[in-house]
Image: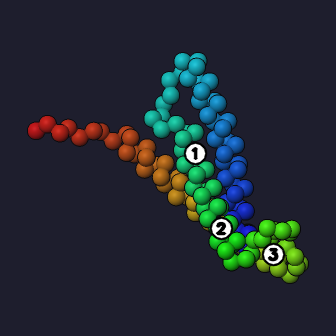
Amino acid sequence: MACFIVSAVEAAAVTAVEKVEEKKEARAIENGEEIKEKVPFSRKLKWLSYMLWGGAFLLMFEHVWHGEVVAWFPFLTAMSDKADMIGMFKEMATVGVCMALLITAVWAVMCVVADMIIKRPAKSSAK
């Protein structure tokens, strides 16, 4: 019913942290500091942001398709009845949180793999 809201809230928070990190990295470059990582942390956060925003948008579209999200107030059909609200909050707490955690875990694995790929030695093509 509203599980996409959890991913959207996390995406908004990650986007804010990403912007702060970009400014911090830009200041470090201006000060002549050397950046240790090949893939900046702000770019990795951007990956997570894209994954979360994309997932939230697709879930919202699916909920609109099934009539659970409407264009008039209260926008979520479950908000019109108190009994349905309990089910909606339970879905957000279980399904929404699990999906957001899964996306974040996949992103963490992606970051580790990206760092491993960058750190591995290049193969020489000459024989």
**Residue 79: quadrant of the picture:** bottom right
Q: Which residue is mark 1?
A: 46
In the image, taking residue 85 as reference, residue 33 lies left or right, namely left
Residue appearing at x 86%, y 81% in the figure: 83
Q: Secondary structure at mark 3?
A: helix
Q: Amino acid at mark 2?
A: Phe
Structural distance between the alpha carbons of marks 2 and 1 = 22 Å
Q: Residues within 10 Å of mark 1 (few under 14, many from 20)?
A: some
Q: Secondary structure at mark 2?
A: helix
Q: Quadrant of the N terminus?
A: bottom right
Q: Which residue is mark 3?
A: 77
Q: Which residue is mark 2?
A: 61
Q: Residues within 10 Å of mark 3 (few under 14, many from 20)?
A: some
Q: Residues within 10 Å of mark 2 (few under 14, many from 20)?
A: some
Q: Is residue 90 visible?
A: no
Residue appearing at x 70%, y 68% in the figure: 3
Q: Residue 23 at what x, y percent from top left?
A: 64, 30
